[in-house]
Image: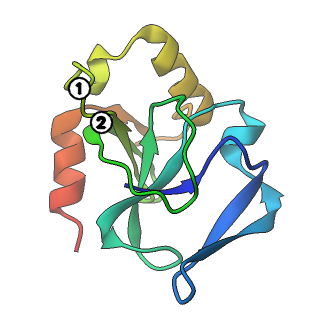
Amino acid sequence: MVVEQTRQYQKRMKYHPETNQFTETEWDSLAFVRDVPYPYGWLKGFGTPPGRHLDILLISEKEYELGEIVPVKIIGVFIRNDGDNKLVAISPERIETDYAQLPEKEKRLLLKLYPGKFEGEGWFGTEIAKDVIRNYS
């Protein structure tokens, strides 16, 4: 994954592919507002913001730099009713292979970020995440 947003930045970051740089926007990041410490970005090789891309949330409290390329293991996805789904990843060294296996503390933090209040939304495991990636075109 490519890191686009970290807890070090209150404001939402915007990526500029023409210069490979990030700038702060005027809006607070959702993770900051909802007190979720996990980095956010996009799945390398599947588009680039601001164009079409696959978003990914990394369950990690490690510090990352904007633009850092991080190896990940995808274990789930948050399906949004607007189609802007969020893949869920962990470090490849972790033993979990599916969202359902995450510790409750981590699941609670994810629910703070995306509570799934709208019809058709929810948290799903590895197989649905693989479908999202497979169906990306």
Residue at figure coordinates x 40%, y 11% from the top left: 103
Q: Nearer the viewer, residue 118 or 129?
A: 129
Q: Residue 69 placed where, x, y %?
A: 39, 57
Q: Position of residue 109 (x, y in %)?
A: 56, 23
| 133 left or right, relative to 89 | left
For the residues marked 2 and 1, what is the alpha-carbon distance in whole angstroms?
6 Å
The label number, if any, that marks residue 76 in the structure image: 2
Residue type, mark 1 in image: Asp
Residue highlighted by disc 1: 98
Residue 50, compared with residue 31, is above or below; it is below
State yes or no: discs 2 and 1 in contact (Cβ < 8 Å).
Answer: yes
What's the residue type where badge 2 is placed? Gly
Q: Name the foreground residue: 38 vs 128.
A: 38
Q: Quadrant of the C terminus?
A: bottom left
**Which residue: 61% across, 27% down?**
112
- SS class, disc 2: strand
Relative depth, front residue between 18 and 134: 18
Q: Position of residue 35 (x, y in %)?
A: 71, 30
Identify the residue shown where x is 20% and y is 35%: 126
Q: Quadrant of residue 111?
A: top right
- Rendering quarter of residue 129: top left
Instruction: Determine the secondary structure under disc 1.
Output: loop
Taking the spot 23% from the left edge, 67% from the top edge, the residue there is: 136
